Image (cartoon, grey):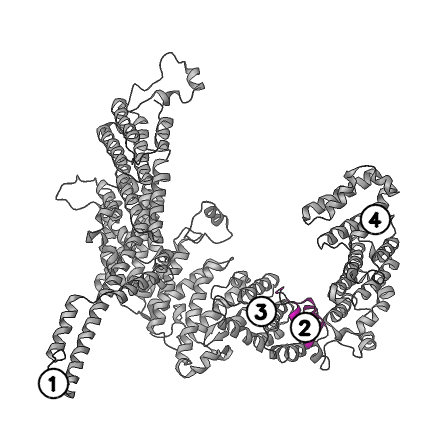
Amino acid sequence: DPRGVLRQGRAFLDFFWDIAKAEQEVRLAATENLLRHLRDGEKDEELKYTLKRLVEGLGATREAARPGFSLALAQVLQAFEEIPLCSVLEQIKEKHNMEKVKKKLVRNAAFGNFFGVMALFQSGRLVKDQKALLESIQLLQQLAHHQAHLRDLPRKTLVDIMSEVPETVFEGVLFGVLQSDLASAFKSPENLHLLLVGIQKFPAVMKPKNLKKLFGSPTVVNEETIPRLVELMQSAAKAEKKNKKLPTVVSDLLQVSLKEDAFELFWKDGVENGLLKEKSGPVSYMCYRLLGSALPLLSLDQLEMVLKGKVMQHYGEHVVTTQLPDRFKFAPEMEGYLVDFMNSCDDVERQLAVIIGFSTLTNQGLPVLSSSSKAVRHLQPAALHKYIDWVKTMFLKPDFDCCLDFLSNRQKHNQENTNTTRHKIGRLRKWLIHRLANTIESSADKEESLVMDISRFCFFHAFFEAKKKTSQIVEASVLPAEPLDEQTRLMIENYFFGLLQTLNTLPVLGDTAEAAALREKHIHGMTADGKLWIFLLVEYANTLLSSEHVKALKPFTKEQRDAWERTLKSVKNLQKMENKSDSSKVIAFQQLLLLMALHLFKNASETMEVLSDLLDCTERAFSKEPKKKKTDTAEPGWVEVMVEILLSLLAQPSLLLRRISKSVFVRICPNLTKSGLQLILDVIDPYQEQNEESAVVVMEESDRRIKSAQDMDEEGSKDSSDDGDTEEENDSGDEEKNEEVDDDFRSRLMNVLQGGNALVRDESDEELDDEAMMALDKNISALFAEQQKRIQAKKDEKDRMRKEKILRRDFKIKVLDLVEAFVIKQPDNPLVFDVIEPLLRVIEQCMISDSDKQEVDFLQKTANIFRNSLCRSKQYCKRVDTMQEDLHAFVERLVKKACKLTDTSVALYYFSASLYLLKVLRGSSADKSSTLPDSLSEEQSNNIPQASQLLSTGCLNMERVTSIYQKALTHFFTKRNSGLTTSMFHDLFKRFPV
């Protein structure tokens, strides 16, 4: 009796309301609570009512409710196996009888039947009950005719059910019922999918003779069926357009073609000569997905056929023609297919065939595959070695016969101008050398021998060439078939120095215990035996310099060769000191020396002066001789010279140089002098902006640095500045366009016109003759040409100044790294106090200057160093008894400056700096009276950990400091436009309650 159930309360009925709600979490919770209630109650009336409500809900009008009731019904049937499935199926048919319901409710009834069968199937009991299974299949077959409402859902459910049933049930129950559907397999993609699943799942039942009885052919893929299969695959592709995935029916058809040994027919006639002929996006993308999905399933011969076929060429054309940002790009998806293949395939030859196949898909010599593809990192070690050998061979002897080269439509029109062999070789070599360099960074399992092999190859072809073949040097054992031009050499040179950056950050390789121990210490840039990678390259370079079989592209002069030898000697001396002194300092100096030595090959004339100073500094830094006292006339100390060298290196467009420079600076921080620190601070000081000497290190050859922004080891710091170029150029262009003609140009124009009598008007109104008119035109033309040159010169000068400003700001941002390193590594150094005012001046200047991105980055970095690395540091100088007077005057100066400022944000930094100095003065250990009074015992003082801090004043002159802040507080209360705020004084009283 339903009324008896309803009288028990609302809690039971609320389960059904919650099951119908749109939120999935609510539906799942309600289903679990309903099952728990039914198990605990064990009342037949509640169970009957539950079945009734759930069956009714299957055809609910709200779409979210239907799957909720279907899932709940499936769970109930799974929990209570005594409920016969046939009776539930009869209830479903009776409640959702599509012949009896009104026309407007046919859709709901159709969904009610469908979700009812889904509930029976999801209960896991349907495949065990043959009668219910048979009736459910027949019901789904009837529902398949209602495509307007259910689309292909019944067919997909048929496939799912067929995939779950055992072979005996399929043969005894389903095969007879589904014969009509299987026989009409070529009428729709859904029926074809049903057939393909049956062939793969039940090969003993779906024998060739049974297939012949069904549709007259013992195989699915043959010459007669190919045209119809192409049409069905096209329909499936358009149906899956929004899902952007390979249709399941096409994937199954691929596997059946392999099973029937008809893959070649399927691929060539069905895909290449069938699907590709339809110029449709969804069909083309389906072909690409079919290519990617087929890779793990194919043999070596089949892979070679596919990778040289029309689908690959079509894919290459797609990649080349979809470079615009708003176009759909399939390349990332194909990259995923490649990675999946490499992970699933253990066969070295097949891996090698696929990666070479994609590397030889070229557009005018340039491979379509990204030179930084992640697929390479998943190659087996043997396959990786073979691939690297292939890349080097192709670099030296480009073989376009093995490439699948193509032209885009635009390139075909310009074929005469671009499609030359030299042009193609240049494009291919650029990709190959980047692929080599990138392999060290991207490959997961690398061997030291492979890394060294690639590094030597890049170095040799960047700076050397073989006079003749020789087996003594591996890189000279094969001569290039086409000589390397200067542009290619320059490109390899840039990639090599980018490669050095990768080697410098490379973890220790190898599986030995020593390598694992070094990795735990986070050692980078070294081999397992403790040698620097860069040192091994310098040794190799020294071997090449001594060889008679090769020659350097830029031979060293005697002076440069002496510097090279001196550098090697200095490095060997440093290596002997590694165990005796600070090893990290020794290694940092080694890296800098070795790097500058390699830079001799790039630009010897520029490097010589820096290298010579660096060698002198190194010798003095590690010298055991006693330090001489400095006099006014003495030469600068080694620290000052080293700081100047590091500043000059920071201006270089090399990320590796900058990182090693910072590493060296960290090691020399304990030896830093006041004058050495001042050299750094002068660079960032805004008041030194007008001084040419502060910018000379950046302004030298600024054009070359801008041009070299494409270097492999170029840091991305210029990107932000380059983004603003167009706007400023447009602004300047507008200014030139709207600029009024100056008086000087007007007067010169008047003189030209008067000289030609163009402004003379007499009564006769005689016109100028032709010769006079031509002469006048010539003079006017010359005048306007000269004026245009002047305008262009002004524009060029303005552009040059803008670029120099960008370079200076970029340089200052890099120099801030040194300031930050000093503040962090030497917080207890009294020189830290000299950093405060320059940082505050930078913050103050940036607050009132332009707000472009680079300026904001500069301000944020400076503020972060001041706030976090300096003021909030828990370590500070504890010995300031000799500086008490200076620090008190410094506090007074900072507070007075904060009072003068009207900008609250800037005043806050000055006020915070004064609080930092208060902390230093109070925390100084010079004050002998700062002890606990006798009234506090030792036990009491332990219970009050802050007692000594509260009572101690250190070197702080309380009377003087109180007067300073009292005046500031008076200024705050009496001046309306004061930059001080309540929070500043709140912070003061909270931190210094004494």
**Disc 1 versus disc 4: distance between alpha carbons?**
116 Å
Q: Looking at the figure, which quarter contains the C terminus?
A: top left
Which residue has dot 3 on it? 349
Q: Are marks 3 and 1 in contact (CB under 8 Å)?
A: no
The region drawn magenta spans 231-260
Choose top left, top right, bottom left or bottom right for residue 332.
bottom right
Which residue has dot 4 on it? 51
Which residue has dot 1 on it? 764
Q: Earlier in the sequence, mark 4 or mark 3?
A: 4
Q: Can residue 309 be seen in this view?
A: no
- Residue at screen point 32% across, 20% down: 930
Q: Earlier in the sequence, mark 3 or mark 1?
A: 3
Q: Which of marks 2 and 3 is nearer the N terminus?
A: 2
Q: Is residue 525 above or below residue 934?
A: below
Q: How crowded is mark 1: few (under 14 residues within 10 Å), some or many (20 or more)?
A: few
**Disc 3 versus disc 1: distance between alpha carbons?**
98 Å
SS at mark 3 in the image: helix
Q: Which of marks 4 and 2 is nearer the N terminus?
A: 4
Q: Do the residues labelled 2 and 1 touch (CB within 8 Å)?
A: no
Q: Which amino acid does label 1 sit on?
A: Ser
Q: Which amino acid does label 2 sit on?
A: Ser
**Disc 2 versus disc 1: distance between alpha carbons?**
88 Å
Q: In this view, does 472 lie to the left or right of 239?
A: left
Choose top left, top right, bottom left or bottom right for residue 3.
top right
Q: Looking at the figure, which quarter contains the N terminus?
A: top right
